[in-house]
């Protein structure tokens, strides 16, 4: 199994990377600054033969193209892409900037670029490698905050809207690639104790990673375009 993971240097992305490596898989771990990614560097010492560290800023076209080139220099196929990188503008800030009265264009654009447009363009760029893989799968990490059905609060405006946009982008992609032997799904990973989720979160990211890897293994063509939890339960749009 050859997996490509964005935002692999911390949180859920790091756990996914660690667990794929422990299973014996090959991982292309993309992060903005691999040279500063201490945990990834440590994993690389242990799994140098199967872990490839790549620089990738998902908001930068040239960076995406360079990452694809770097993967192509090592393999001609990928089996799984996990669009994990994400941002919650002003996460952890005591001053909540995603409330009415505090909203700015910059925060909106940042959320849209990282959470919605980035995953779409990374997927677009890696499609040829995924088509050449075994049952090429794209799992994009969304959020229950992106569910229109579940939406009951204003805050966080930008994060919710960007995840809803991600859902639509990936639903569009799924409609187009479903007949090419590819599968694309959206996954709500639960409320995890990470930099983004904070210490009060209910879930260990290791459990989410385990569930997402299992989900990736068990995906069928008829699930293409679906939105599910890390345990495979349907999430309302
Ligand atoms: P973290 O904040 O711990 O990690 C976010 C990751 O995204 C980091 O690796 C970060 O890199 C990377 N990233 C941010 N911007 C960019 C960019 N422009 N290009 C490339 N990488 C970038 O978040 P989590 O691990 O908690 O979140 C993982 C995913 O799960 C996200 O998509 C998030 O929205 C989603 N999610 C999380 C929940 C939670 O409770 N934690 C709940 C629901 C969904 P860097 O270190 O360089 O900043």
Image: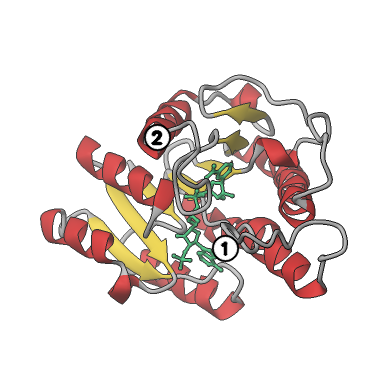
For residue 204, the mark is 2
Left or right: residue 76 compared with residue 225: left
Q: Residue furthest right?
A: 101
**Display coloring:** secondary structure
Q: Position of residue 127 (x, y in %)?
A: 56, 54
Residue 181 is drawn in which quadrant? top right
Neighbour class for label 2 at 10 Å: few (<14), some, many (≥20)?
Answer: some
Left or right: residue 210 compared with residue 95: left
Residue 10 is drawn in which quadrant? bottom left
Question: What is the quadrant of the C terminus in the image?
Answer: top right
Left or right: residue 50 compared with residue 64: left
Q: Position of residue 149 (x, y in %)?
A: 83, 29
Question: Who comes first in sequence, dot 1 or dot 2?
Answer: 1
The residue tagged with tag 2: helix, strand or loop?
Answer: loop
39 shown above or below 25: below
Q: Which residue is mark 1?
A: 125
The residue tagged with tag 1: helix, strand or loop?
Answer: helix
Left or right: residue 189 compared with residue 14: right
Q: Residue furthest left?
A: 46
| Residue at image location 63% in from the left, 63% down from the top | 90
Question: What is the quadrant of the N terminus in the image?
Answer: top left
Gap in Å between the C-alphas at discs 1 and 2? 31 Å
Q: Label 2 near label 1: C-beta < 8 Å?
A: no
């Amino acid at each position: 199994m050859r997996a490509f993971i964005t935002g692999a240097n911390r949180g859920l992305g790091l756990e996914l990377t660690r667990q794929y490596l422990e299973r014996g898989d090959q991982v292309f771990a993309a992060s903005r600054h691999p040279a500063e990614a201490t945990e990834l560097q440590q994993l690389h010492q242990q799994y140098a033969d199967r872990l490839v560290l790549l620089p990738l800023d998902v908001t930068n076209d040239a960076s995406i193209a360079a990452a694809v080139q770097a993967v192509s220099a090592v393999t001609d196929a990928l089996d799984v892409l996990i669009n994990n990188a994400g941002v919650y503008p002003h996460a952890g800030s005591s001053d909540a900037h995603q409330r009415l009265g505090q909203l700015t264009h910059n925060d909106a654009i940042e959320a849209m670029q990282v959470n919605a447009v980035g995953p779409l363009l990374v997927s677009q760029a890696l499609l040829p490698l995924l088509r050449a893989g075994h049952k090429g799968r794209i799992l994009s990490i969304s959020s229950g905050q992106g569910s229109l059905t579940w939406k009951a609060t204003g805050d966080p405006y930008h994060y919710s809207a960007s995840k809803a946009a991600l859902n639509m982008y990936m639903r569009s992609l799924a409609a187009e690639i479903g007949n090419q032997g590819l599968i694309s799904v959206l996954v709500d990973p639960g409320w995890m104790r990470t930099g983004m989720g904070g210490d009060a979160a209910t879930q260990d990211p290791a459990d989410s990673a385990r569930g997402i890897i299992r989900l990736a293994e068990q995906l069928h063509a008829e699930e293409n375009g679906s939105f599910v939890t890390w345990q495979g339960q349907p999430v309302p749009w």
